[in-house]
Amino acid sequence: MTSSAVHPTQERPAPPARPSWPDATGHFGVFGGRFVPEALIAALDELTEAYEAMRVDPAFLAEFAALQRDYTGRPSPVTEVPRFAEHCGGARVLLKREDLNHTGSHKINNVLGQALLTKRIGKQRVIAETGAGQHGVATATAAALMGLSCTVYMGEEDTRRQALNVARMRLLGAEVVPVTTGSRTLKDAINEAFRDWVTNVETTNYVFGTVAGPHPFPAMVRDFQRVIGDEARAQVLEREGRLPDAVLACVGGGSNAIGIFTAFVPDDGVRLIGLEAGGDGVDTGRHAATITGGAPGVLHGARSYLLQDDNGQTVESHSISAGLDYPGVGPEHSHLHDIGRAEYRPVTDAEAMEAFALLCRTEGIIPAIESAHALAGTMRLGRELGPEALLLVNLSGRGDKDVETASRWFGLGDRSEVDPGPGMDTDQHATEGAVASGDAVPGQDAGGVA
Amino acid sequence: MSRLEERIRAARAEGRAALVAYLPVGYPDVEASIAGMVAAVEGGADVVEIGVPYSDPGMDGPVIQQAVEPAVRAGVGIRDVLRAVEAVDAAGAVPVVMSYWNPIERYGVERFAADLAAAGGAGAITPDLIPDEAGAWLAASEERGLDRVFLVAPSSTDARLRSTTAACRGFVYAASTMGVTGTRATVGDAAETLVTRTRAVTDVPVCVGLGVSNGDQAAEVAGFADGVIVGSAYVREMLEGRGPDGVRRLSQELAEGVRRQAVRP
Ligand SMILES: Cc1ncc(COP(=O)(O)O)c(C=O)c1O
């Protein structure tokens, strides 16, 4: 079935060893699988078969590696952040710099792989869902690079929050469709993308943005993202001569977290910690902390934890971060949680924004608000573990797209004085809320950009 | 024999296809939606697909989404659905529940099967559950003697047609086109091809859904299928405020259609 028979030997980069899950039908323990209309099964089978052949094909692996190096700019560096670490109980903190990738986040890693796969199965059109817009921008970028036509579904609410990325996608030649059904955020964008796919499956490939969805997406996206952890593990070993005590990442659907966790899963001494979006606080009900505050069920094609009510309806999630504002999570995270290999903790909007401001001020790095959740988790864990600890954090993206949101949060607006300062508290947020609700929201007319 | 299959075979014995009507519970409210279902039966529906409102109806187009969203917001759930089952049963049609999987899983698969059987339901159609993932439902429906209807699609391979229909009882739901629910100008050849391919691997009756909205289309589909499934057109009657009267009229037109000698275009 694979093409390895055709290309017998020669400089084949050995495909990296995979975890023992999922099984052949896409199950991670009791999670994962395929819960989709029958009409999509043929396309999912086609994708699975093509991907299984491609992932061991030396020609593909070489092309993928070259793109990652020459286009994305891999390997991304690891940066130690001592001034930030002063606020982390003195623990040492290393950032894996996915924010420095072309297009500004880890999302490009996955998209280049899926775009190559799209060409291989002979389809000319890609569709994608996006929340923060980073996956949409990455997909639009890969489509431009490879000459594919591209449609991106984005909740109307998110097109407002992330107007800059809407403009970027349109500049790259993609069609951006604002989704006005349901909660008008990422989950509804995914529904719309599936509807498009089932209708146009003959010509169209769905480039899924995270490690959720039906098999083979969770395994395939993981395999494309695991380069983060493969690199980081080697980088940390080389510079420190030891493994980190903990690896931290934010969890929306879970792709950047799985990306950095996978290489460390066999390292029993390394704690794996996923930070979920706690919104206003898990006990308020306004959050996106799926594993912390949800229960197992079925959403978007797979069994996993999700936020749901007693009728099995998906509950709307809330987060200041569009990229984490999702009521589901990838099935591999549910499995890692259930077997106790990874821990999942909530981080509130306020905690994330405090960490956001702190990294800006102490290190000259503006993180994505998504990634700021991982930073906030690092501050807390560092205080728990103390100065001996070595913490590796996935800085999944940069914050250019979030400047508007952050300005509103900190009440910067048109004021000349800019001093949120580390340690700013929720009072400032409250003041700011008044500012935001009184002002016209910048980016409100996102739909008209470009 | 299964209740659904029995009813569909009875229609066939009359030289016609069965009429299967879909309406979701809870639009505009629970009582009115049940009145709509009863009207569909009075107008001539043999089977009513009783829709469970769901927040993420990935297989549904805009018409059904529009009716289901307020029902979800109003908290309509399986308990309300079971009342609709009783009403449809009393009105003389065969009630079958149509539900995305998560509401059933959340309610509890065994509890759902027990309560559905007690309410007089014939079984359930599960559009996002394939037999490969249906272990718990296959066991529970077996225990309660309930029908289970899975979907086949134009893209299904012959091997999948075989394995999926082997798990079906009652009827096989042939999704006529690649796409979501909604009314369409034409039914298309894909439907007939799919029915032919499906019949080659099973004796279970084959009903065709997706896109039928009027008597002529019903007649066309009745020319090659055992049953004609109509959803969005019924829902539109409710959405546009014509209520039970509109639903009854539509049922009459469709019931006439499934009895007409189909004229193939
Ligand atoms: C920078 C960044 N980090 C994280 C995420 C969350 O996605 P995931 O959990 O799949 O990494 C996003 C999603 O848009 C993102 O843009």
Image (spheres, coloured by chain):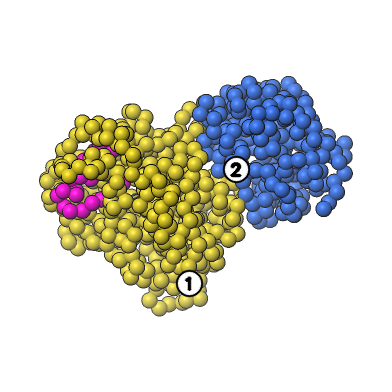
Residue at image position (58%, 51%) is A198
Which residue does the numbered mark 2 point to in the structure image? B61
State which quadrant residue B151 falls in: top right
Near-viewer residue (A270 or A420): A420
Which contiguous range is marked in magenta?
A349-371
B172 magenta-colored: no
Quarter of the image with the N terminus of chain B in it = top right
> Could you tell me if the residues under marks 1 and 2 are in contact, i.e. CB atoms within 8 Å?
no
**Mark 2 within 8 Å of ligand 1, using the beta carbon:** no
Neighbor class of circle 2 (other Cα within 10 Å; few <14, some 14-19, many 20+) is some
Secondary structure state at the residue bearing disc 1: helix
In the figure, is residue A358 to the left or right of A439? left
The tint chain A carries is yellow
Please, which residue is most extreme toward the bottom here?
A10
Residue type marked 2: Gly
Which residue does the numbered mark 1 point to in the structure image? A4
A369 magenta-colored: yes
Residue at image position (32%, 69%) is A69
Residue at image position (68%, 56%) is B158
Secondary structure state at the residue bearing disc 2: loop
**Residue A75 in view of the camera:** yes
Q: Measuring from the top left, give residue B67's x and y in whole percent.
A: 59, 33
Q: Measuring from the top left, give residue A420's x and y in whole percent.
A: 17, 41
In the figure, is residue B122 to the left or right of B66? right
The tint chain B carries is blue
